[in-house]
């Protein structure tokens, strides 16, 4: 199992979350499209040569974002990452992928 995390503007979060679930992320037993989200403020300054979806070159931008976390089977990771890249509005997509340890190894 893997955990996939991305940060997306709040107004785009549902579209990205739905695409991730449709691609096979968030499956746990008899449940699917499972995710966890938290909201916060993302900050960045676009440099020369950037083509920001939000903000202006050289100016600090603050965006209300949603952090979306899902679990994902190994065989679905590439497909889920592909749909994130397709539906995410940012030029540079914040993306974290972690391999998880099976809880059964610890009696869980």
Image (tube, rainbow, N blue to C red):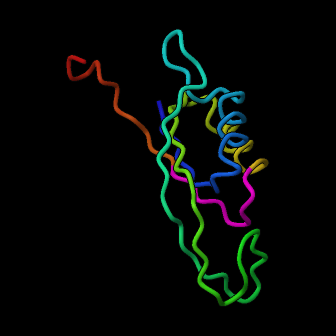
19 relative to 7, above or below = above
Across and down, in percent, residue 70 comes to: 52, 35
Q: Residue furthest left?
A: 107
Left or right: 58, with 26 as reference point: right
Across and down, in percent, residue 84 comes to: 70, 46
Across and down, in percent, residue 49 comes to: 77, 85
Residue at the image position 69 percent from the left and 33 percent from the top: 18
Q: Quadrant of residue 47?
A: bottom right
Q: Main secondary structure of the magenta part?
A: loop
65 relative to 108, above or below = below
Residue at the image position 54 percent from the left and 73 percent from the top: 43
Across and down, in percent, residue 59 comes to: 64, 87
Q: Quadrant of residue 50?
A: bottom right
Residue at the image position 79 percent from the left and 48 percent from the top: 86
Of residues 97 and 61, which is closer to you in this image?
61
Of residues 92 and 12, which is closer to you in this image?
12
96 relative to 41, above or below = above
Residue at the image position 34 percent from the left and 25 percent from the top: 102
Q: Quadrant of the C terminus?
A: top left
Left or right: 22, with 99 as reference point: right
Magenta segment range? 88-96
Left or right: 106, with 4 as reference point: left
43 relative to 58, above or below = above
The reply to whether the magenta stretch includes residue 50 is: no
Left or right: 57, with 107 as reference point: right
Q: How many marks?
A: 0
């Amino acid at each position: 199992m893997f955990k996939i995390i991305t940060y997306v503007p709040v107004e785009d979060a549902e579209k990205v979350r739905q695409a991730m679930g449709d691609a096979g992320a968030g499956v746990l037993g008899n449940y699917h499209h499972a995710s966890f989200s938290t909201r916060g403020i993302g900050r960045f300054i676009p440099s020369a040569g950037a083509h920001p979806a939000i903000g202006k070159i050289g100016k600090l931008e603050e965006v209300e974002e949603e952090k979306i976390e899902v679990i994902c089977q190994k065989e679905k990771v590439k497909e889920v990452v592909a749909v994130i890249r397709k539906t995410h509005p940012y030029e540079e997509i914040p993306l974290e992928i972690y391999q998880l340890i099976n809880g059964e190894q610890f009696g869980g």
